[in-house]
Amino acid sequence: MSTALERFSINQMTVKQLSMPELVEACVALEIGNVGLWREPVQSYGVEATAKLVRDAGLTVTTLCRGGFFTAIDPEERARALADNRRAVDEAATLGTDTLVLVSGGLPPGSKDLHGARERIADALAELGPYAERHGVRLAIEPLHPMYASDRCVVSTLTQALDLAERFPAHQVGVTVDTYHIWWDDTAPEQIARAGAGGRIHTFQLADWTTPLPEGVLNGRGQIGDGSIDMREWKGYVEAAGYTGPIEVELFNEELWARDGREVLAETAQRFVRNVIS
Amino acid sequence: MSTALERFSINQMTVKQLSMPELVEACVALEIGNVGLWREPVQSYGVEATAKLVRDAGLTVTTLCRGGFFTAIDPEERARALADNRRAVDEAATLGTDTLVLVSGGLPPGSKDLHGARERIADALAELGPYAERHGVRLAIEPLHPMYASDRCVVSTLTQALDLAERFPAHQVGVTVDTYHIWWDDTAPEQIARAGAGGRIHTFQLADWTTPLPEGVLNGRGQIGDGSIDMREWKGYVEAAGYTGPIEVELFNEELWARDGREVLAETAQRFVRNVIS
């Protein structure tokens, strides 16, 4: 692996047009040693088969995305969510990653109660945390940008994520630090320090902020260097907080998905070197 | 004026399909006593003419929207922005409102420096505040939702807005509390208390949060009651902080703009009574 890419990890979603074998092959060809995987393509290819594929290629799986969606009120729905999250933990363990990223869930239909929804996340973590620990997996609560608060994730800031995580041991529950979601927040640097001091930075992800945002605001995450975020600054914050782990680039971007996946992977690695490392 | 609508103010943008005389006529017909105006339609109709129109109809102008856009680096651009803001103060004074809402501006092209942009806002306020005071106008910094941080307003939270405002006397600079921008923020209630204690809640505005957000995320503000925000809860916070002034409904919404303006105005007043007052 090249030194400049030593800490680089490609999140599978960035190049979702690549099949699992194509992704692994392209990583090997580009001397990329780390990948973050998503449950749906892993399940399609088969969990054991994916584990073997990446292991045989010498790749490290840095995270599995994603568990979560803990905010339902209905007891049956909650039980189903917990069961599904236990399967996600199992899959993470099978893939050999120690980190399961959590997108916690939005408001249930008709509800306006953000506080109640956040408390239901804590209830779920109390059940899932010990299960994850027994399987050697850490849960990483990801605060999502406040524009997702109603329909995707009621945890909108690192402060809120840490307030939740700190109710549990750090080896059970920590946080995902993703530049896209927190770059606007001037309290985030001190929260990164708080997370680092507690050993709770379980993964560090990058995406750039570009406008105009597309309809639905899901698939407009910018290629590194194209937007408003100073990546070196944020890398500096997590490093000052003691984080020395992989740095995952996770882009949801229709334009990137429309291009050749290998070309996008090569470009993303170059952008990482140019805007984050050098 | 009906008692239920005593504190209701219709922000002109909500029914921008109405001409200035149509708006005033519709307000009188519906016993709505307060309007928030925007500079562009006021300038089109004429500042003096608008002042006379609303005064003759017995309407109160609760705010003028908007000044701001203080984040440019180029000295000439900064001078132009300040000159334009002095004109906005003059217009507010002519219209008889004591409150000019400020949208502070985004990142200049190519810049990734949110902190620097926020400091340039403070520099501008130091010049504009005394000018506004001499004209009997208070500046109301509006924190905009973090999804606007790069291209519209680097002030994303009430905390940031108050950190800026408190460098100046409260009768010069306060804040705009708008539910649409802050509803996701669990620190906002304590910041409203902070703002109230300092006499800095200069206006209180409502819009509801609905998804999916439209492309560009500008014109998807939901009609009161259609979304995720508990309006009574937020009214409770500002009232507990001592705010007893008008409550402005300001919606940017393509679907509402496509309908008959008088019908939308009547509906908005009804929604206000149903979801905010009763």
Image (cartoon, coloured by chain):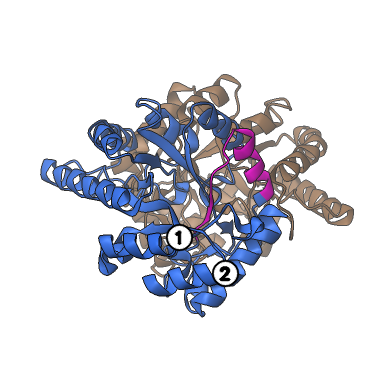
Chain colours: A brown, B blue
Give coordinates of residue B11: x percent, y percent.
Answer: 46, 60
Percent of width and height locating residue A151? 64, 57
Q: Which residue is mark 2?
A: B30
Residue at 53% across, 27% down: A191
Residue type at mark 2?
Leu
Q: Which residues are magenta?
A: B232-250
- Residue B111, which numbered label? none
Q: Chain of mark 2?
A: B
Between B237 and A117, the residue placed more toward the observer is B237
How many neighbours does mark 1 have within 10 angstroms: few (below 14), some (14-19), or many (20 or more)? Answer: some
Q: Nearer the viewer, residue A13 or A143?
A: A143
Quarter-of-image position of residue A120: top right
Where disc 2 sits, the SS reads: loop
A73 left or right, relative to A184:
right
Q: Which residue is mark 1?
A: B58
Q: Secondary structure at mark 1?
A: loop
Q: In this rendering, is residue B220 above or below A55?
A: below
